[in-house]
Image (cartoon, coloured by chain):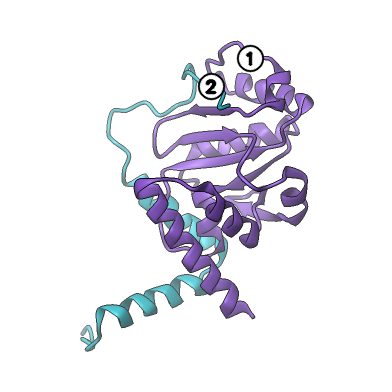
Chain colours: A cyan, B purple
Amino acid sequence: MTKVIKTSFEEEQKMKEEAWLRLTPQQRLEIAFRISEMTRRPGVNYSYKGMKVKISRPA
Amino acid sequence: MKLQSKEHIRFLKALLKFDVKFLIIGGHAAIYHGVRRTTSDLDILVEPTQSNGEKIIAALHSLKLDVPEISPSEFEANLVLSFGLEPDAVDIINYTPGLDFATIYKNSMLADFFDVHVRMLDIRDLIRNKELLNRQGVRALLDQYDIEVLKKIIQKKK
């Protein structure tokens, strides 16, 4: 059974921050990658092959 | 570990293969150092030299990208190269406000980026960079958030 705890938004955020910092840098990168992976759209070709490189030359 | 973004990894491997001098900056560096957020692209800072420009162009060609006409000597002036669709988008820049490449390269650390060993911008240089970017709108809010969290992380480590 899942235990329900009484908390506040601030406490919850603090707990999440602390848990995040306990991870290794590699684990943090992996989680970020997994989340960004969810933004992929089906049927879209993400391959770099043939993709145009845009060049800008700021002053 | 399953590679989540094969295109990013292929790109980084190509940079290493052609001996490009570069660092990972931006959102990935922020996440690496402890900021709890995501990012939609990979930001790479490259050494602004002609010889590095030659290597970068070769690396991009090796990935079969469509690279417009560009001279390696142009890498000595301010330049931004962008390609890819989010979340595989890449920005290659050769300048960033207030940071000298030689200094930040020296300060950087070797990081394991999905089994590819690359140099990551130091946390203090990342804060300095974010403070000097002076971006507007949503990006400015993101920079402020990153700075606040990164400073707290440094405080905790003391």
Q: Which residue matches tag 1?
A: B70
Q: Position of residue A10 (x, y in %)?
A: 30, 79
What is the x, y in percent for residue B6? 50, 38
Nearest the eye: B129 or B15 = B129
Q: Looking at numbered disc 2 in the image, what kind of residue is underneath it?
A: Ile
Query: Label 2 is found on which chain of the structure?
Result: A
The answer to which quarter of the image holds residue B18 is top right
Q: Are marks 1 and 2 on the same chain?
A: no
Residue B108: mark in rendering = none
Q: Is residue B80 left or right of residue B59?
A: left
In the picture shown, does residue B40 fall above or below B144? above
Q: CA distance from mark 1 to mark 2?
A: 9 Å
Mark 1: which secondary structure? loop
Instruction: Answer few, some or many: residues within 10 Å of disc 1's Cα (few below 14, many 20 plus, some between 14 and 19).
Output: few
Q: Give the residue displayed 40% in from the left and 45% down from the top.
A: B136
Kindly tell me whether residue B80 is visible in this rendering: yes
Q: Contact (CB < 8 A) between labels 1 and 2?
A: yes
Amino acid type assigned to the residue bearing label 1 in the image: Ile
**Residue labelled with disc 2:** A55
- Classify mark 2: helix, strand or loop: strand
